[in-house]
Amino acid sequence: MQHDGQIEAAHNKAFGGGYEYDDGFKFIKPIINEYDFKIANLEVTLAGKPFKGYPQFSAPDDLAITLKNAGFNVILTANNHSCDRGSKGVIRTLDKLDELELVHTGTFRNKEERDKNYPLILEENGMKIAILNYTYGTNGLSVEKPLIINYIDSSVVRKDVERAVALKADYIICNLHWGKEYRSLPDGYQKKWEAYCYKVGIDMVIGGHPHTVQPIQKKMNANNEEQLTVWSLGNFVSNMQTRPTRGGVMVGVELEKKNEKVELGDVGYNLIYVLKKKEGAITQYYILPDFDYNKFRPGFIDAENRQRKNYFFGDSRKLYKEHNIGAVESIVDENSALGKLYQKYLTSYYSIELKETDPSLLSNQYMKNSLFKTVDYRGQQHILYGVYDSKIEAEMNVRFLTDCHISSEQNIVIVTNGHVTSVK
C-alpha cells in the first residue's frame, strides 16, 4: 500500500523529484528471489498525479518499478481499491504494468482480454499453475463496461475453475480479498468461501484485506490431498500504525510434480516488520524480516520501534502457535549467507557503480540478484553491481562486467550506512 506518509517520505526533492523505494526492499529482495513465482497484491492504482493515499489511492509509477526490481513477477489487481480512480485509473494501472512487462491478473480492459488471459497460467518445471484473483467489493465504487473487476461470485469462480481445468492446469491457486479488517482469525464469510473454493476444485487459497496476519493452515481433503489456506497476509508495507497492522507475513510454497500430479511440499514463512526511518534526504519504509539489526548497526532500530517490532512478532507467533498447521517459520541466521549480506548492508561493503546503464538490467534474470539501485544520504541515485568484502574482489568483477559489455564505465565504491564513496 502507499499512504500519504509513504508517498511524501519517498519523494526525492533533492534530485529530480522522483520517488525512492528500492532501499526499503533490499532486506527482503534475496528472499523473494529464492522462488520462481513472486506474487504481490497491488492495493493501489497507478493512476498518475495527483498521488494520494487513503481513501482513494494513486501511487507513483516508481513503486511498480521497485516491485519489479525487487523480483516480483506476478501482480494481483483485484481488491477493494481497484476502482479508486475510476475507469482511467484501472486502465492506466494495467498500461503501466504492461509497460514494465509485469504479468498481472484480477482486472481487465474488456471481456475479450479476460477471455484470452484468464485464468492466468504460469508455467515452470513442467507444471501449469492457474492463478485466480477476486475481491469482495470496491468500497462502493464501480467502473463502466467494458472494464471488468473480478468480484467474488460463486458462478463466476466455478466457471473460471472449469476453464483452468480445460486449459490443463495442474494446480489452481485462488487469491481472495475478503474478511473483516483488523481481525486475527477468519470470519464466517471467509470460511464459507474457502469451503466453496475447495468444493469446486481449487488447491490453494491465499487471502488478504484484514491488514493483520491470520493463520496459515495445511489441510487434507477427502481424497487425501493436501490443501493450503493462508487466511490473511497482513501488511507487506503500509503506513498503518496500530499494534497488529505494523507488518505482515511472506509465505513461500514448494510445488512438485510427481506421477503427473502436482503436490504441495514445504510451506515456509517470514514474519516482516515495517520500519519507518529517515536516512538523509529520504525516509525509507524498510521491510524487515526478524534479525538482530542493532547488533551490527547500533541504533538502526530505535527503542520505540524495537518494542513495536517485538510486540508484532510476539503477537503473531502466539497466534500462529495456537492456530497454524504445517507451516514453518524462517528466521535469518546471522551466520547464513543472507545474514552475512545483512551485516554488510548494516555496516559497509564494496560495490561497483555503473555510470552508464540500461535501467532494464535491474530486472534482468541473469543480473537481478547482483544489480540494484540505492540512494545516498544526499538523495543521489546509484546503480550498483555486487556486494563485496574487499576492493580486490570488486576489481575481479569489474573485468567480468567489461567483458560482458554491460557498462562502458565502472567505478569501485564503498557504501557505508548510506554514504557512497569512490575508492581510488
Image: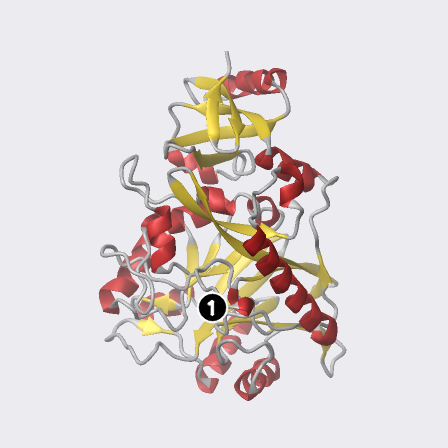
Say which residue appears at 59% left-offset and 57% top-offset: 272
In terms of image quadrants, where is residue 243? bottom right
Q: Residue 250: x, y in percent?
A: 59, 59
Identify the image quadrant of the N terminus: bottom left
The residue identified by callout 1 is 119
Foreground residue among 183 and 99: 183
Could you say which is closer to the camera, residue 3 or residue 270?
A: 3
Left or right position of 283 against 219: left
Q: Nearer the viewer, residue 56 or 119?
A: 56
Q: Nearer the viewer, residue 419 or 329?
A: 419
Q: Residue at x 56, y 88 (%)?
A: 188
Residue 358 visible in the picture: yes
Q: Please name the residue shown 30% across and 34% down the image.
A: 15
In the figure, is residue 203 to the left or right of 193? right
The amino acid sitting under disc 1 is Pro
Instruction: Provide residue 99's location: percent of width, then percent of height.
Output: 33, 48
**In this picture, is 354 found above or below 308?**
above
* Kind of element beneath mark 1: loop
